[in-house]
Image: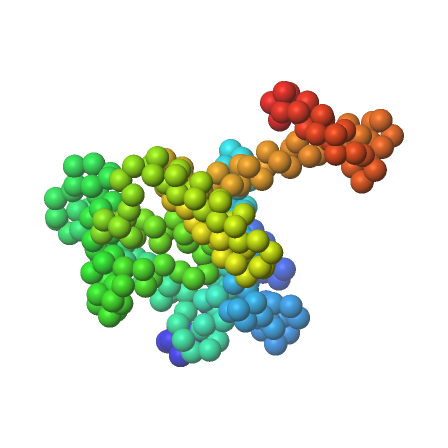
Amino acid sequence: MPAAASRPLLGRMTNPPGPSRDIADLLEIMRRLRADDGCPWDKTQTFATVAPYTVEDAYEVAATIEDGDLKALPDELGDLLFQVVFHARMAEEAGLFDFGDVVQAVTAKMVRRHPHVFGGAPAEADSHSQKLAWEALKAQERAAKQQTSILDDVPLALPALLRADKLQRRAASVGFDWDDPTKVVDKIAEEAREVVDAGLDPAKRTEEIGDLLFVVANLARHLKVDPEAALRAANAKFTRRFKFIEAALEVRGGSAAAASLDEMEALWLEAKAKGL
């Protein structure tokens, strides 16, 4: 058990606690939520059950930034910070590490990976060169961990589209890549034909659809498009247009469930013409 775990983090907190700018207060709130007399839900959680909420909160931060709603960003970042505190508290209870260890690990890593800022090493000429230097430092860290493949530390838990992008970037860093985006487009056409050729075999169709999505992610990388952000934008566009269809049908006294495909397609084109 870390030494800090045996002492109370804060003795001055009011009950109920009020808003605070002190991280120690947040740590104490988490401790109290997990205490025997704390919240019935919080105190029964595990790393595995909390992890999906951690991912969800990270995406809510990204969505808030994408929406340009910076006034809401402190609240969303707070939710994400709380996830870190939650995991750290569970680890502290298990005698593994505490929040201080988390802070120590990331500060050590940032100093280690920025020798041009903290170690007197010369900075690279531009941000691209600096990113390559960062990747070289990460490769050294993988070697120190005895990870033999450049793909070893690409997290399995990433969303599949994002992981595809990262896997391809790693492979490209050692030259395993197409040299022309048009070749990727040709590969997409080939993979699309293979989806059709897969016939009615569910396993084969799943495999071929996966191959198609993987190559689409590759094209996005070649065109310097974030595939995850592009798909989020497409989802948002679809949502806007379909809601327009629903609203228009409701005004007419109908519904999407009762409308014909032709009716909905006409309204979809209307929504598109309106720039939705």
Where is residue 29? Give x, y as percent: 55, 63
- Taking the spot 65% from the left edge, 33% from the top edge, the residue there is 240
- Taking the spot 28% from the left edge, 46% from the top edge, the residue there is 177
Q: Is residue 103 above or below residue 121?
A: below
- Taking the spot 51% from the left edge, 41% from the top edge, the residue there is 231
On the image, which quarter does residue 138 sit in?
A: bottom left
Q: Is residue 237 above or below residue 58?
A: above
Q: Quadrant of the C terminus?
A: top right
Q: Is residue 188 visible?
A: yes
- The answer to whether 167 appears left or right of 274 in the picture is left
Where is residue 8? Give x, y as percent: 47, 71
Where is residue 191? Give x, y as percent: 45, 47
Q: Quadrant of the N terminus?
A: bottom left
- Taking the spot 32% from the left edge, 63% from the top edge, the residue there is 152
Q: Is residue 22 visible?
A: no
- Between 60 and 128, the one nearer to me in the picture: 128
Where is residue 72? Give x, y as percent: 55, 40
- Between 47 and 264, the one nearer to me in the picture: 264
- The answer to whether 273 appears left or right of 254 in the picture is left
Q: Is residue 52 above or below residue 250?
A: below
